[in-house]
Amino acid sequence: MSQLNSTRAFAAAIIGLATLSACSNAHTAKSVDTDETSESFMTDSIHVNDTLVMGGCNATAKISGLYPTGDDCLSDSVRKWIADRLRYGLSETGTPLFELHDGVYDNGDSLIRLECDLLLADARQDFSSFIADSISVSYEYDFRFSPAYTTDSILTYSFGSYVYLGGAHGGATGCGQTFARSTGDMLDSGNMFLPDSLPALLSMVKSGLWNQYFKDDIDGSDMTLRDVLLINPDTLHLPAFPPVYLQEGINFTYQQYEIACYAAGMPSCTISYDSIRPLLTPKAAALIPKP
């Protein structure tokens, strides 16, 4: 798989384009990309779909995914991460929908039922005032999560959400999280990269964004990265969500409006392991998939 195809495959996963067998409760070890030597990761396929209709207003909530069922530290860490992503389903910076504690994410079906009920309760509160003013509106909530890549040393999970609350268009979030299989520890830019590596890392990300994501869709040879971003490329920062390990390298995905306009989607690039290895901490480098 090329770096460009790897990037697109992950982008598809994080926005929930992969088909999930939501009707099955059988244990499975499903992933998008799997190293041939990797251990299985046991999950249940879970799904909830509910609607709310009040006057001329309606809301639909859909949540589906592959939820960890193991009793090891890795499974517990992934469950907690999924719950954390769900509780910020309405706002990354606002008040979470529920408090995060062991009991809330022990059971996947109970977790997504709680999330669905809270989403529709929030919609109900809005609709009560809309009906009084004879306003009709449709809301949509769609959340999906699943393994994206796994080896004998790491597991990368993807999470995608789409929320539409009226207006011209909805908002999507697409992110991932890589876990160390042996400990369940979550990897992020703080523990993956050497302290003095940021300038070189950002230079790689800029090059990757241009060559893998933007360049092929640009008309005119005089265009540069500066012409397609909302920010000055010289001030580019790492994405809000952690970079993740994929088959061909480490992926960096920016959210809608984070560095580019809505129409640009979620700018993303994957830097090969050979290129990025010198910038990694010894522990992060040791997790690179074996060729």
Image (cartoon, rainbow, N blue to C red):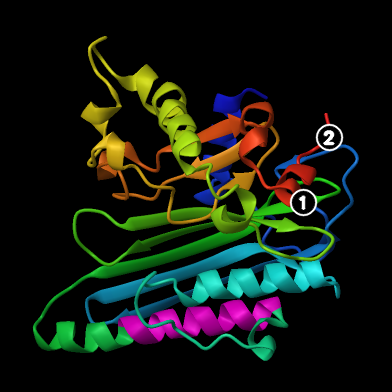
Circle 1: element type: strand
Percent from the top left, x then y, of residue 18?
60, 46
Q: Nearer the viewer, residue 1 or 139?
A: 1
Question: Is residue 11 one of those drawn in magenta?
Answer: no
Q: Amino acid at mark 2?
A: Lys
* Image side of residue 49 versus residue 102, left or right: left
Outermost residue to the top: 221
The tag earlier along the polypeptide, 2 or 1, is 1
> Residue sitting at 19 percent across and 60 percent down?
167
Quarter of the image with the C terminus is top right
Residue segment shown in magenta:
108-123
The answer to which image quadrant residue 288 occupies is top right
Q: Residues within 10 Å of mark 2 (few under 14, many from 20)?
A: few
Location of residue 213 (image quadrant): top left
On the image, numbered disc 1 is attached to which residue?
A: 154
112 above or below 132?
Answer: above
Quote the CA–CA distance across marks 2 and 1: 11 Å
Quarter of the image for residue 149 reads top right
Task: Name the spot of residue 240 as percent of width and height, x first.
Answer: 43, 56
